[in-house]
Amino acid sequence: MKRHTYVALLATLMSASAWGQEVSLYGTTMAQMWKQDAAGTEKATYTPATQYLGIDATKLGSDNLSLHLFGWGRTDLSDQSNFDGKTAGYLNYGYLQYRFDQANAEIKAGRFTANQSTGFEQIDGVSARTDLVNGFTVSAFGGKPVLYKVVDPRNQHDYDFQHDFIFGARLGWRMAQVGEIGLSYLQDGTKAAQDLTFPSSTDYTRKRLGLDLVVTPAKAFSLQGRSVYDVSNQRTNAAEQDYTATVKLGDQVTMSGNYAERNFRFYFAGTNLPSLFRQDDGDLFKGFGGNLTWNTTASFQVVADYRHTHRETFGDVNRAGGEMRWNFNERAVLLGVSGHWANAVDTKFVDPAAPSRSLSHKEARAWVMLNKGKFTASLDGILQRYESGNPYLAGLRNVFETVASVGYQATTNVKVSGDVSFGSTPVAKHETRALLRAEYRFGFAKKGGK
Amino acid sequence: MVRKSVLQILGVVLGLGMLMACGLVSPEASFAATHPEGLGAGKPVCSECHSTDVAKGALKPYATFDHTPTFVKDHKFQANQDRNTCAACHAPSFCVDCHGGKVPMKPATRLSDSPDRMAPHRGDFLTLHKIEGKLDPSSCYSCHGRANNDKCRACHR
């Protein structure tokens, strides 16, 4: 879609909010400044200013019609910039929604995220869903896929050409206290690589068939997951299996286990970064793990987690860790401590010049939040300690970041806060950042979200 | 191509119109657009109040929506199937905190004054991503596999 079409659409949508009987406007203004002392380069200062803005306008003439907009803009207040130009902006979503009183039916038109099928897609188009009789549901969407347009257009031509249209549909069936099963289809692009003026060996078209499942025979147990198949070729190939079972033992303990399997050749089909998400590896991934959550009281929670992953061309990795959280005096003081280990000693191959064990690392984090009257304060520290000889760390073993924040809730709808952070990374031996934040909201909405 | 696109959209709309005309649409009233009572701060445990019944529309026990650590980490299934249940409490902008598509800063920076939230990429993730990407690139793909980001391309050509 061309820029002037965007502007016209956005202006129309924003003016439509004036018809709303209930309009909520929420925004966050952030001014950042950071100094970087990077090895081999001069010290640099960056000062970007960012504005987030959202509008929810409901009851637009009808109780069921609403408008939702959210976007951001940014400009660099100094001449130095490592961003995508001095100014940038983006409309994350902007759509009209009609919500029917019956059957959970709704229609959306504009820019929105469609995730009822196998993908999580941002599109400029329309979508609709409704419940049917006997527990069936149906949903569908179609439109132009949103491309971020930050790459040199000459490098994006093939991708743009093939991604002319995206559509998907899902048919589901649900039964009370039993669960739900859904069958979905997603197609991204209607043109094949051989249709290009200069036919390419890289094909970005995606055609996916999905099966999703939730089994909830009792409130103490649920099984949920999905299987995704790549059907862009003549053969149907499994791209993903991902299932999680959750068991609740009384009111305090929750256990969950997950199994996932992915075939990268088909899972990464359609990526615009084939050099990063390599399809040609033909790599297989399998992972399993779980976590145990214990809410000993309303104010104390312990979580322990473990995960084993296996990549066919790479090897095995084990991760384990835990977290403790305290909540004192009805959230007047919140405290969290966590530690995690990633053990990659069974990896087969990383870099001929470096031992595979160098990818093993440990992470520790501690944070505290204080809320007293209109004042808030928080301190957050995170440390990552790597094995010696890690090829990515420029000789460093410890990488850390600490963030201190104070805030003042001036009114119910206005809050100002400021952060200072200090850290050390392989890129910047010393990095100091400051951030000023003003959050405000006006209107009627009670729903959460900034 | 435009004609083809318009026809496809028209097909979807007509298909749904036919469903309504055929009387296949459920006669049940829709799930509440807004939770009738204000919720306290922190992650809600839906089953504390909704102990025995199932969520209308979703037809699943409310316990399925309890905001446990597993739920927060793995909520894609509920978001896919029961988005209207989420919408009773969450404004659309809540999703954008992490799932914005193109964003000006990582979620952990934007939410740096809320260390209790499970915002992705805390600390120096620029370094860590080189390792995480080796260990499990599929975890990156769900958010970054479709993003046409030239910062990625600066190294990943």
Image (cartoon, rainbow, N blue to C red):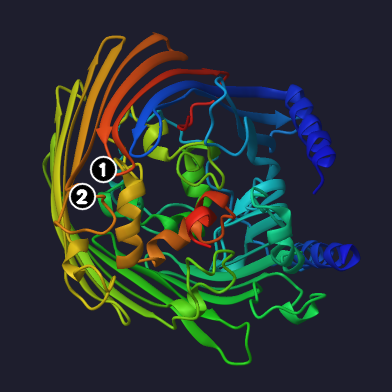
Disc 1 and disc 2 in contact, CB within 8 angstroms = no
Q: Which residue is drawn at 40% across and 28% down?
A: B38
Helix, strand or loop at mark 2: loop
Give the residue at mark 1. Answer: B48
Confirm whether residue B115 shows in the render.
no
Q: Is residue A17 left or right of residue A139?
A: right
- Residue at mark 1: chain: B
Kind of residue at badge 1: Glu
Horizontal and vertical percent position of residue A441: 53, 19
Helix, strand or loop at mark 1: helix
Q: Is residue A418 above or below residue B19?
A: above
Q: In this view, does A412 lie to the left or right of A297?
A: right
Q: Residue at x 48, y 29 (%)?
A: A450
Front position in the image: B28 or B90: B90
Give the residue at mark 2. Answer: A395
Label 1 and label 2: CA atoms lie apart by 51 Å
Kind of residue at badge 2: Gly
Front position in the image: A350 or A220: A350
Q: In this view, does A23 lie above or below A111?
A: above
Farthest residue to the top: give it. A410
**Is there one chain holding both mark 1 and mark 2?**
no
Number of marks in the rendered image:
2
Horizontal and vertical percent position of residue A268: 51, 72
Q: How many residues crowd around disc 1 within 10 Å: few (fewer than 14), some, or many (20 or more)? A: few
Q: Residue A185 carries which label?
A: none
Q: In which quarter of the image is residue A425?
A: top left
Horizontal and vertical percent position of residue B73: 33, 53
Q: Is residue A385 above or below residue B93?
A: below
Q: Residue at x 78, y 29 (%)?
A: A16
